[in-house]
Image (cartoon, rainbow, N blue to C red):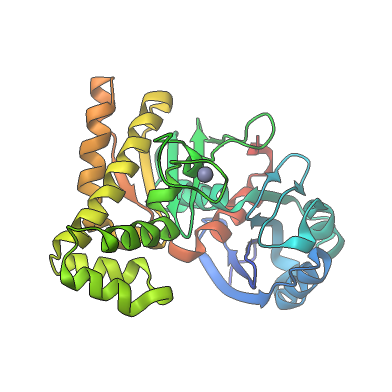
Amino acid sequence: MSSQLYLGADVGGTALKYVLTDSRGEIQRQGEVATDPQSTAETIERLGHAVAPWRSALQGVGLACAGIVDPQAGTLGRAPNLPGWEDSDLTGAIGAVFDGLPVAVANDVNGALYGEYRSGAGRGADSLVMLALGTGVGGGILQDGHLVIGADCGAGEIGHMVLDLEGPPCPCGNLGCLEAWAGARGVVRAARERAAGEAATDAFRRLVTEQAEALTPRHLSELAAQGDPTAVALYHEVGRRLGQAVGNLVNVLNPDRVIIGGGLAAAAGLFLEVCREQAVGQILARAARQVPIVLAELGPHAAAVGAAWLAREVERID
Ligand SMILES: [Zn+2]
């Protein structure tokens, strides 16, 4: 075990996943503790106990968390999954347990993007855009090696880029956000809509009826992989909408690379080509049409690994 370790944590609604990385960002140890959704302090205490054996080697602590995180103030604002954590002082809570260590905090997708930038699919690039296709769609932007946070910590909400003013409803209250097509919830909604239509195949209709409330994108991608035309068309629509967003982002930011992550990325074979075609058709700068659209590499540890990197590079946070 290396004598210099960085602790990176990713707080979810039920569990806090952590990694201990060495100075090259390699994971030396990993684990998890239960999240107390009502108490930041209690959860950080549990983390402190879990890593106590390595306390003397720790050089910094980073924490990634879903919600509006202000990396400079070290605070968490709105946090839908962690009601008791809203408007809390994350840096203070971490400092109370890990006294004297440098602390970094970040939004979870920014954490994952930073992890990919330093150890994964974004290595060697300076400017990246990441789309995390989970239940919803998360986003992150990195420019010249710095995460783009925005004046009010509101930057990077790529999932809520409106693609059609008359599109399907999004939980955010708007219509036609990217998330309404390319998040798991949106895919399931779109599948039910297709199943009710005239053109749906019998197999598709049967799957949607049989699975009912248990229907997931996994069921649908398995059917698409068997060549079912309705399921294939459903994933082409995911690709087309994703491509619309990627095309818009490349026209605005011209990144070195676009990274697609999240659970839905496992089915990328069903939509990535369509995504690329749609994006390329929209991109104005000829050279930018070559932008690589790549899959995330770090999987479920990305945000914790990124948080550990941020702790190591505290002064780099914007
Ligand atoms: Zn939205």
Quarter holding residue 297 = bottom left
| Residue 161 x/y as whole percent | 47, 37
**Residue at point 20%, 38% (across, down):** 277
Q: Residue at x 67, y 55 (%)?
A: 62
Q: Is residue 288 or residue 272 the one in the foreground?
A: 272
Q: Which of 139 and 317 is in front in this view?
A: 139
**Is residue 290 at least partly visible in the picture?**
no
In the picture, measured across the screen, residue 298 lies left or right of residue 11, that is left
**Residue drawn 41% across the image and 55% down it:** 186
Which quadrant would the N terminus be assigned to in this image? bottom right
As drawn, 35 above or below 140: below
Name the outermost residue toward the top.
285
**Residue 48's x, y, as percent?**
77, 71
What x and y, as percent, mark residue 231?
22, 62
Q: Where is residue 99 in the image (x, y as percent from the top left)?
A: 85, 59
Quadrant in which the C terminus appears: top right
Mark count: 0
Q: Is residue 244 above or below residue 109?
A: above
**Front-lying residue, 193 or 4:** 193
Image-quadrant location for residue 53: bottom right
Residue 205 left/right relative to 2: left
> In this view of the protein, which residue sits in the foreground, 128 or 126?
128
Residue 230 at least partly seen: yes
Residue that appears at 52% across and 66% down: 27
